[in-house]
Amino acid sequence: MRICLSLVALGLSVASCSALGGSAQCRVDGDCADFGVAVCAEDGVCVSRPAMPPAAAPPGSGPVTSEGTSTPLPPDASTPPVPVEAGAPDPCLATNKPRVPVAGRSPQAGILEITTNTTLRCTEDHVLVGDVVVLPGVTLTVEAGTTILGDVVTRGSLTVRAGGRLVAAGTAQKPIVFTSSQPPSQRAPSDWGGLAVLGLAPPTGTLPHLALPWGGTDAEHDAGVLRYVRVEYAARGLELGGVGRGTAVDFVQVRKAGDNCLRLRGGTVRAKHLLCQYPGDEMVEISEGYDGELQYLVGQRTPIRDRERNGLLIEGARAVVTNATFCGSDVTNDSFAFVARSGASLSLTNAIALGFGAGLDVQGAPASLEVRGVTFHRLHA
C-alpha cells in the first residue's frame, strides 16, 4: 500500500527543507550569524566560540545536563580539568590539538579493550585505532568539546558492550565530535567504522559486525549519555542495540554515513532532537523488537545514482514518532518517507515529508498503524 497525500502547508514545508542548505553549514564566519556567537570551522560546521568560558565544575561533579543535574564521573575522572581564567581562551576549543591513540589492552589483532574507567579529555584529539571496545562494568567518559578520530587505515570504531557505559555529554557550545582521521577536505563516508552502544534492555540479539550480544530484561537500563554529539563520515553512523530508557540520547547529529544515520536494534530508549544528513541508506532504521519513542527528527539527503533510499524504515518493532521533517531528493519514484513492514507497529504524529516517491509504504499487515497530522508532498509533478 502506497500513500501520497497533498500538501497542506506548502510554503512552510518547502522552507523546512530548503533551509537545511547544502552539505556544509558555512563557508565564512558570517554564515553562522543565525547560530549566535559562532565561527565557521574548517569542516564547514558552525562552532560556538564563547568569549567568556563557563565556570569550572566543582570537584567530583560530572557534565551538567540541560535539566540542571550532573552525571557522576567514574573514580579516575573525579578531578575536574584545570579551571580557565576569565577571558583566557578555552583549551577545549583550541585548534591543532595533539593526537593520541585511545589506550587499552589488545587481546587480539585489531581489537583494543578499555578495561578500566577512562576519561577522554578535550585538550587532545583521541584516535580510535582498530575496533575499540568498552567492556561490561566500565565507563568511558568523554569531556565536552572533545574530538574523537576514527583511524582510516584500520577503520577504527568504538563499541560499548552491554553492561558498559558511555558518558558523552557535550554542550551546544562544545559538542563532542566523532569524525574521520583524514584532513577535513579529504573526509568521505565510510572512512571509519562508527559508534555503537549496546545495553541490557529487551529483547536480545547480536551486533553483526563484531558478533557482540546485546539485550536482556531491564527496560530501564542506563547505558550512559549521548548529548550534543556529532558522528560523521562513519560506515554505520550510530547504532543502539538493547539500549534502555535510562539512557539519555538527545541532540545527536549524524552526517555522511555510509549506511544508516541511526540504527535501533531492540531496546526501549527514548531519543529526541535527532538530525540525519546524507546517509548511504535509510535515515532511521528500526528493527529487532525495539519498543520506544522518537521525537524531533530531521532528515536531509542528496541524490544517489542507483536508487533512492527511504526516510524511516521499521520492521518487527514498535515506535511512536512525533515531530519529524524528512527531506528527500525527489529524483526517483522508488523512495518512501516512511516504510512499515513485517508486523511493525508505528504511531506517526506531526510530520512533514517532501521529495519522496510516496509518503507511506506498508508491506504486509502491520501490527498497528496510526497516522495523524502528517503531510506528504512531491517537490515536482
Image (cartoon, rainbow, N blue to C red):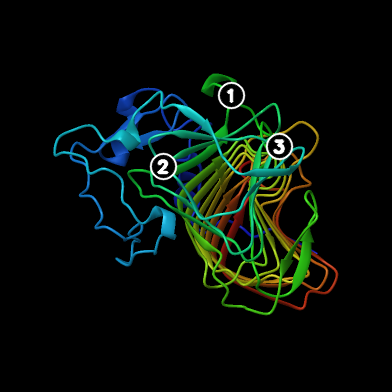
Q: Residue at left 62%, top 39%?
A: 278
Q: Residue at left 63%, top 35%?
A: 302
- The alpha-carbon separation of the residues under discs 1 and 3 comes to 31 Å
The picture places residue 203, in percent across and down from the top left corner, at: 74, 74
The answer to whether residue 194 is left or right of residue 166 is right
The residue identified by callout 3 is: 331
Residue 211: give its label.
none
Q: Residue at left 67%, top 67%?
A: 242
Please report contact status of discs 1 and 3: CB closer than 8 Å, yes or no: no
- The alpha-carbon separation of the residues under discs 2 and 1 comes to 21 Å
Residue 121: give its label.
2
User: Which numbered disc, 2 or 3, marks the residue closer to the eye?
Assistant: 2
Q: Indicate the secondary structure of the residue bearing disc 1.
A: loop
Q: Indicate the secondary structure of the residue bearing disc 3.
A: loop
The picture places residue 78, in percent across and down from the top left corner, at: 36, 57
The answer to whether residue 34 is left or right of residue 281 is left
Q: How many marks?
A: 3
User: In which image quadrant can residue 381 be found?
Assistant: top right
Q: Is residue 95 above or below residue 311?
A: above
Please report contact status of discs 2 and 3: CB closer than 8 Å, yes or no: no
User: Which numbered disc, 2 or 1, marks the residue closer to the eye?
Assistant: 2
The residue nearer to you, when weighing 348 against 137, is 137
The residue identified by callout 1 is: 182
The picture places residue 311, in percent across and down from the top left corner, at: 66, 52
